[in-house]
Image (cartoon, rainbow, N blue to C red):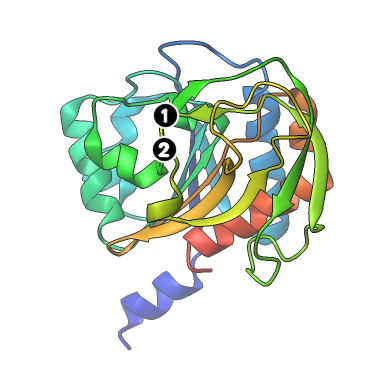
Amino acid sequence: MTVALVLAALAPMEVLVFSRTTGFRHDSIPEGIAMVQAIGAKEGWRVTATEDPSVFNPDQLRNVRVVVFLNTTGDVLNPSQESAMEAWLRQGRGFVGIHSAADTEYQWPFYGQLVGAYFKSHPHIQNARVKVEDRNDPCCSHLPAIWERKDEWYCFRSSPRPNVKVLGSLDTSSYQGSTMGTDHPIFWKHELGRARSFYTGMGHTKETYREPLFVEKIRRAIRWAGRN
């Protein structure tokens, strides 16, 4: 192993939190940024938060291991920035999408595959039961088999299940407003070529980012996406 590779292996993992919005803006974004920063401080990661899309270029992405799309909405990257992000991910990097990351970049097919599903609609904020489907998976082995919590529960344009590993799904009998039938995935992960992607539909409310189970889920997701 070369000196450069040894130094790269010893360097702190770099995590980029991106929260640009061109549509609806969640007032929980500051809480989400603070959550990732706090996780990073404990883990020894270098966390950078930005809403500047110009960072999506080969030079500035070179040392980033994971990008977190935190409640982004709308068209947030131009074509050259999209190309830079796609090329970077295909090198074996990681993506974590939170909540309205699914309400982002509808015209970019690669992004739709990366996230796994696009947002369609949501009912009012309410309690619901989440069925954790694989408690042996390292991203969610800390969760109870039934996880009850309050959030804005997204419905998606199509089910991601054929293309991803679903980790948690909604018990649609426990709340009102699902349009997806009895099988309603809400968080999942998958690999797209060499890229790793984790998405959770949770994350609308400020309180979410102070929930220990949710915080730990995101910590584990970033570690998995970053191969750390």
Question: Which picture quadrant has residue 94?
Answer: bottom left
| Residue bearing the label numbered 1 | 157
Query: What residue is drawn where x is 80% and y is 47%?
Result: 147
Q: Distance between the residues labelled 1 and 2?
A: 7 Å
Q: Position of residue 186 (x, y in %)?
A: 59, 41
Tell me if 125 is positioned left or right of 83 in this view.
Answer: right
Q: Where is residue 117 in the image (x, y as percent from the top left)?
A: 41, 37
Query: What residue is drawn where x is 67% and y is 22%?
Result: 28
Query: What residue is drawn where x is 75% and y is 24%?
Result: 206
* Quarter containing the N terminus: bottom left
The answer to whether the residues at label 1 and label 2 have Cβ atoms under 8 Å apart is yes
Q: In this view, does 97 lie above or below 223?
A: above
Q: Where is residue 112 in the image (x, y as percent from the top left)?
A: 32, 38
Kindly tell me whether residue 12 is visible in this rendering. Answer: no
* Amino acid under disc 2: Ala
Q: What element carries label 1?
A: loop
Q: In this view, does 1 lie above or below 215?
A: below
Tell me if 43 is positioned left or right of 97 in this view.
Answer: right
Pick whichever, 134 or 22, lies toward us.
134
Tell me if 96 is positioned left or right of 214 in this view.
Answer: left
